Amino acid sequence: MAYIDYYSILGIPKTASESDIKKAYRKLARKYHPDLNPNDKVSEKKFKEINEANEVLSHKENRKKYDEYGEHWQNAEAYEKAKQQQGAYQQNYKGASGGYSEEDFSDFFGNMFGGRASGSGGRQVKFRGQDFNAELQLDLKDVYEAHKRTLTVNNKNIRITIPAGIENGQTIKIKGHGGAGVNGGPNGDLFIQFSVVNNTKFKRDKDNLYVTVDLDLYKAMLGGELMVDTFKGKVKLNIKPETENGTQVKLKGKGFPKYKKEDQFGDLYITYQIKIPTNLSEKEKTLIEELQKLR
């Protein structure tokens, strides 16, 4: 495997923070995204390299292995074990024969990375594939209902079902959709982190929703009916006479879907904000003054 400088691909130094890596990746991913560069083979190749670099450097443990072992980072654990075995073997060999030659171990590490394992009867060592990390940005409306979506990871299309109720920052694992295993080893996994953007007037707290609704002064004093928006359609509310500013009512089951709990929803909390009338006519002012005197 040829050495690939992932830091250079993202245009960052080896001392870059996690935040620096994320910013650099997002900037370059937008620039070279296939949707923005249709039929551009150079951009397609660059986009693949950027994703590969991010998958390694954004993962703390993988980055540590990459910094130490370079192109052999995926086999870091086996490499460490091989060094320990080599040390033990060298010690035993030296004790038995009074010395050893470097040639005796010249192919030891080569066997660990694609060759035949020493002393194993020709058996090849299997290594698990690399785990991949991806970020998927969705609008809040996208996660109100479960739906299917096709993702492109390392030029492979993966069809996944996104459950309703996914939260911002939540990560799910797609087993076996990471890098290919070595010498028949198992594939790695794909970890998808969701970035859920809320462009609605509703505030979300897990499976509950919160919204502030304007209520005119007269309806607040006398009571009446008011049509309000829920996340899915409108409902009619009965306003009690003498409703105070800041009054909160709960609409049970009108909130957000509960994650992986079919047909279960949180609640919607509505807070009334009384609107004081402006641009009063002379007659309105006179009537309000009479009301003031009565009070």
Image: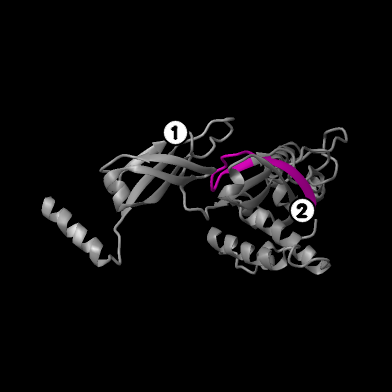
Q: Is residue 268 above or below residue 57?
A: above
Check residue 29 for magenta coloring.
no
Question: Please, what is the three-letter code of the amino acid marked with disc 2?
Answer: Asn
When asked about the image quadrant of residue 52, the answer is bottom right
Residue under label 1: 252
Q: Is residue 55 above or below residue 282?
A: above
Q: Which residues are magenta?
A: 154-172
Depth check, front residue: 209 or 289: 289
Depth check, front residue: 214 or 128: 214
Which comes before the other along the chain, label 1 or label 2?
Answer: 2
Residue under label 2: 154
Look at discs 1 and 2 and give the one toward the viewer.
Answer: 1
Check residue 155 for magenta coloring.
yes
Q: CA distance from mark 1 to mark 2?
A: 44 Å
Who's the residue at 59% across and 44% down the image? 143
Question: Please, what is the three-letter code of the amino acid marked with disc 1?
Answer: Lys
Who's the residue at 39% across and 50% down the image? 212
Residue 78 in picture, x, y percent from top left:
71, 42
Question: 267 left or right of 29?
Answer: left
When asked about the image quadrant of residue 248, the answer is top left
Question: 275 left or right of 20?
Answer: left
Q: Secondary structure at mark 1?
A: loop
